[in-house]
């Protein structure tokens, strides 16, 4: 009796896991099959193989360029976030500032407001006055501002975990602050820097709202915004183009994960820290 | 190189006075220990010599030149940290060669120098490993090799042996003493372990609350501790420190201590309160009552290997009532029996207030 119950339990658990796996796998399957289908729908089916969708998306004047725009904006924001967050996190970790933790928490709280819809109007107003509307720089600065607090928060943890004796030891040997940063601190916290860079690229890559608001010219829009414009003349979502473009749009991020993971030992298992 | 400290004071923000107008001279080639309980300022003192702490006032001179205003990198000292501070992303060669890399020595030459030093410290097999792949003892030798590779005027060691396990610590101690002897470079090390200080150092400074309580050779510190604090701190078994009183009788002055009548040092007035110090190693056990012995009941026996530490509990009121005696193996008294602890008078120390006044009238 007990054995039967045990077996039934295992069958139920396996069925549940299979269902959950299917739930997450189906969109991936769709992304892999629909671009090669002559008449894609919103269901997953064996494709009627064609490459016509790729030709069609290449005919779209903004599609390929938008991926370039995404690269510029995501790369720019990641560079700014990594450089500024590591300097700030290092300083916050090493210098005793009164009310340091409060400052960090307030920053973290504000960051969700800054990138959120609540501050949309003032940010647009500010960008207009500074002449940053419709520029890559405008997008990069605004999204970086949104990412920085969380990046500082995470990197400070990495910096805190690095013993100060490393730096003091290097100082006694005569290393300058810049040498200490280059030779010791940056290599030691490199997994953290890689994490932040990948996270920044991924968030900007998937970001829509700020880019949609700040950019008027479709020639400067990133892929996430262009994806939104792929409609048929009848106003229906154009699934041929959307599925194909979605595939092209996701490939660079996958490539980045593989590259960073191989090169910098970016490991997600065992939590954030190394 | 000599090291000379003048009126060194360090007050941390928040008002903690870690060093209190401290003066110290360390001689050429000396192996010098800074010994004290945690929080006594010994590490702050070492870091002030290194330049990692800026003194609030006072001056540090190395080799006669004032270095108080110089940053650590220009003082020509090498420091070995308690956690060794080996750079985890560099292999042993790169770690040892790091000081030379800062000095812009070409790669081939600094790697040759690293290999040479590593060979002397039996690290030749490990040059390609990362610190994480080394044992504690190997890490310590890499840290030493890195300090040696930059050929400093002064070595500074912060608790160099405390991260090793007990067995390895003894080996490393012998190794360290021989190494310092061979190199002949002035070396200052910090320790809270009195045994380590006694074993390694040519001279010891015992510190307490930001001040130096006593400076001297290990035998001097051990045999004639200048204050009850030093007396209680030095020695592997704590010294018996018993309150006593001078009684001047018909046959001259005597000390009445925990039920014993003992010879008093000259020059103490009648009724004077003193502290009588005697090491358990310099106390013998008697099974028969004696006037010059502390009476008590055997309470605890602790086996020390070749000897046994006996704790006597005094039946008398007053005092804390405990006296410890070290007896050779095979001569342990039965627990619960009466016994008398007989101090050897030539080893006894008498403190009046905080100063040593006996047996021969004040500290040597």
Image (spheres, coloured by chain):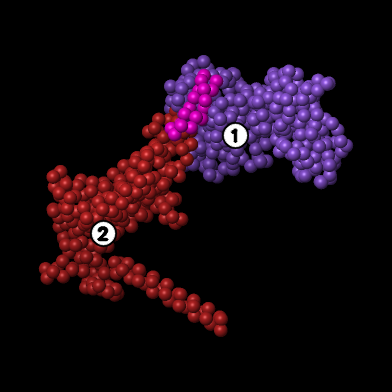
In the picture of the structure, the residue carrying the numbered disc 1 is: B37
A235 left or right of B127 in image: left
Check residue B176 for magenta coloring: no
Image coordinates for residue A110, horizontal then vertical, percent = 28, 50
For the magenta stretch, what is the residue range? B6-23
Can the viewer see residue A183 in this picture? yes
In the picture of the structure, the residue carrying the numbered disc 2 is: A249
B285 left or right of A272 in image: right
Question: Quadrant where the N terminus of chain A lies?
Answer: bottom right
Point 42% across, 36% down: residue: A183
What colour is chain B? purple
Nearer-the-camera pick, B244 or B333: B244
- Please tell me whether mark 2 sits on a helix, a strand or a loop: helix
In which chain is the residue bearing label 1? B
- Please tell me whether mark 1 sits on a helix, a strand or a loop: loop
Nearer-the-camera pick, B304 or A67: B304
Point 41% across, 43% down: residue: A159
In the picture, residue B175 is in which quadrant? top right
């Amino acid at each position: 009796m007990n054995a039967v119950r045990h077996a039934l339990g295992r069958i139920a658990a396996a069925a549940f896991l299979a269902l959950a796996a299917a739930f997450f796998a189906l969109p991936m399957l769709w992304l892999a099959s629909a671009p090669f289908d002559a008449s894609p729908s919103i269901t997953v089916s064996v494709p009627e193989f064609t490459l016509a969708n790729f030709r069609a998306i290449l005919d779209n004047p903004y599609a390929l360029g938008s991926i370039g725009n995404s690269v510029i904006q995501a790369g720019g924001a990641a560079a700014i976030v990594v450089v500024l967050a590591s300097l700030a996190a290092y300083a916050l970790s090493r210098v005793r500032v009164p009310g340091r933790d409060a400052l960090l928490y307030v920053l973290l709280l504000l960051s969700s407001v800054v990138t959120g819809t609540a501050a949309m109007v003032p940010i647009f107003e500010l960008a207009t006055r500074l002449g940053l509307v419709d520029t890559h720089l405008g997008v990069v600065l605004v999204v970086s501002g949104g990412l920085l607090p969380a990046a500082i928060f995470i990197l400070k943890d990495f910096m805190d975990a690095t013993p100060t004796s490393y730096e003091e030891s290097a100082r006694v040997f005569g290393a300058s602050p810049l040498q200490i940063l280059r030779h010791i601190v940056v290599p030691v916290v490199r997994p953290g820097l890689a994490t932040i860079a990948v996270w920044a690229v991924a968030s900007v890559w998937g970001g829509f709202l700020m880019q949609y608001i700040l950019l008027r010219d479709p020639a400067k829009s990133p892929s996430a915004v262009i994806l939104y414009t792929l409609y048929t003349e009848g106003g229906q979502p154009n699934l041929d183009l959307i599925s194909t473009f979605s595939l092209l749009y996701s490939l660079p991020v996958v490539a980045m994960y593989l590259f960073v993971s191989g090169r910098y030992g970016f490991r997600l298992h065992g939590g954030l820290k190394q | 190189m000599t090291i000379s400290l003048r009126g060194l004071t360090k007050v941390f923000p928040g008002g903690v006075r870690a060093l209190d107008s401290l003066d110290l001279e360390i001689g050429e080639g000396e192996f010098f220990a800074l010994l004290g309980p945690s929080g006594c300022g010994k590490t702050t003192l070492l870091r002030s010599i290194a330049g990692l702490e800026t003194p609030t006032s006072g001056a540090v001179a190395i080799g006669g030149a004032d270095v108080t205003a110089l940053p650590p990198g220009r003082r020509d000292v090498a420091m070995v940290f308690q956690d060794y501070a080996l750079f985890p992303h560099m292999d042993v060669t790169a770690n040892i060669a790091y000081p030379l890399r800062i000095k812009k020595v070409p790669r081939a030459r600094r790697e040759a120098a690293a290999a040479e030093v590593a060979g002397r410290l039996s690290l030749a097999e490990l040059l390609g490993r990362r610190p994480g792949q080394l044992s504690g003892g190997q890490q310590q030798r890499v840290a030493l090799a890195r300090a040696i590779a930059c050929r400093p005027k002064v070595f500074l060691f912060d608790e160099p042996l405390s991260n090793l396990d007990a067995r390895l610590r003894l080996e490393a101690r012998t190794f360290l003493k021989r190494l310092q002897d061979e190199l002949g470079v002035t070396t200052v090390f910090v320790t809270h372990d009195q045994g380590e200080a006694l074993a390694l150092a040519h001279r010891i400074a015992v510190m307490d609350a930001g001040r130096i309580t006593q400076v001297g050779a290990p035998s001097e510190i051990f045999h004639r501790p200048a204050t009850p604090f030093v007396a209680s701190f030095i020695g592997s078994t704590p010294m018996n420190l018993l309150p006593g009183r001078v009684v001047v009788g018909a046959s001259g002055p005597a000390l009445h201590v925990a039920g014993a009548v003992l010879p008093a040092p000259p020059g103490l007035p009648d009724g004077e309160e003193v502290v009588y110090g005697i090491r358990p190693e310099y106390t013998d056990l008697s099974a028969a009552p004696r006037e010059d012995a502390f009476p008590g009941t055997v309470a605890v026996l602790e086996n020390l290997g070749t000897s046994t530490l006996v704790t006597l509990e005094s039946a008398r009121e007053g005092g804390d009532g405990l006296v410890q005696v070290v007896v050779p193996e095979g001569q342990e008294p039965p627990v619960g029996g009466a016994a008398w602890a007989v101090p050897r008078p030539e080893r006894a120390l008498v403190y009046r207030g905080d100063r040593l006044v006996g047996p021969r009238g004040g500290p040597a």
